[in-house]
Image (cartoon, rainbow, N blue to C red):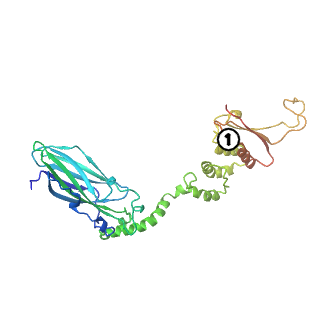
Amino acid sequence: MPSQILHLQLTAMQLSDAMQPSSVGKGAADFRHSSLLTPNSSLSTQHSALSTLLVHPQEPSEIVLQLENIGSRNLRLNVRVEGNFPSEWCRIGMEGYDLAPRSRMDAVLYFQVPADFFENQAALEQGQSLMLDYHSLIYVYYTEEDTGRQLVETAGVNLYVRPHSLYLNFVPALYREVDFIGRFLKIFEQAFEPTVQTLDVLWAYLDPMTAPQALLPFLAHWVAWPIDRRWTLERQRFLIRSAIELYRWRGTKRGLRLYIHLYTDLPLDDHITTETDKHICIEEIHGQGFVLSKTRLGESAMIGGGRPYHFIVRLRPERPNQVDEQLVRHIIDQEKPAFCTYELYVVNSQ
């Protein structure tokens, strides 16, 4: 056997207190060193190192392969990984492919297991158990400069896929040394953790703008706001959130303008002083009553009686189909005082 030229060292970036092999899928995870090594008469195989790596689904895990050229010639490198896990779980990152004498180089192996590893059981056949322990070999092929001699170094990696359990932080260190305890606590964590997370963000469930759609009817009932299916989901959220303010100004010009604004998304134009220039124009018709000697027929007075408590609503939409006239009439009928009359005009900008 030739003397060693390339020295390998594996360093796992994720270590666990408990790395005992799991009994789940143990028979399917059997691995033989010789089964992955393809005989080649031109290659000389040196000794192999062994390391273990803990991998949590969706969380990337890394193991550093340190290469040291202890020979006197340049080496041309090529790294390959084989194992009984899907090939897409692993990718290799290298600084280069040439290693000078008496120098070192790091190659990083990135492992990432799909997020639905424990939930997706479609790949399992009937009667087959889920594999949690995987094994692989790292092949480092290198060629000596000048001599052209080809050799290979190997290193073994045991890959342990485990669920990430927060509850291990609450048990004594003695129990964290048992791999089964972590997987057992994960069962309770998956049952209780969604409730705990809900309590942490309870404010978001009580805000109509961020609450789940299924919770909106409860929030609407909480503020006595009727659900109308003609409203879009976005408009419903705005109206439920603004229900208390709409109640406060109900029956007033300000309340009606705010309601129409929430539905149509037309600007309130509070900075515009002239009413007729606003996108939501609400004009109240005022008369001076019966006054003699100061009125002119057709200008400031009329014969035959007018309409007291009358107002005119003019909307100026900014885009086509922005305003549903029938729905706006429903809003006005609902918000105005019962004794008032009105006219509605939708003025197209084009």
Q: In this view of the protein, which residue sits in the foreground, 73 or 305?
A: 73
Q: Identify the residue at horizontal 65%, vertical 34% (top origin).
A: 272
Asked whether residue 176 appears in the rendered view, the answer is: no
Q: Which amino acid type corresponds to the residue marked 1 in the rendered image?
A: Val
Give the quadrant of the C terminus. top right
Q: Position of residue 242 (x, y in %)?
A: 63, 50
- In this rendering, the answer to whether 180 lies above or below 65 is below
Q: Is residue 10 left or right of residue 120?
A: left
Q: How many labels sit on residues?
A: 1
Give the quadrant of the N terminus. bottom left
Asked whether residue 239 appears in the rendered view, the answer is: yes
**Dot 1 surroundings within 10 Å: few (below 14), some, or many (20 or more)?**
some
Q: At numbered mark 1, what does the secondary structure look like: helix, strand or loop?
A: loop
Q: Is residue 65 left or right of residue 288?
A: left
Q: Position of residue 12 (x, y in %)?
A: 26, 56
Q: In this view of the protein, which residue sits in the foreground, 105 or 128?
A: 128
Q: In this view of the protein, which residue sits in the foreground, 180 or 219?
A: 180
Q: Which residue is mark 1?
A: 323
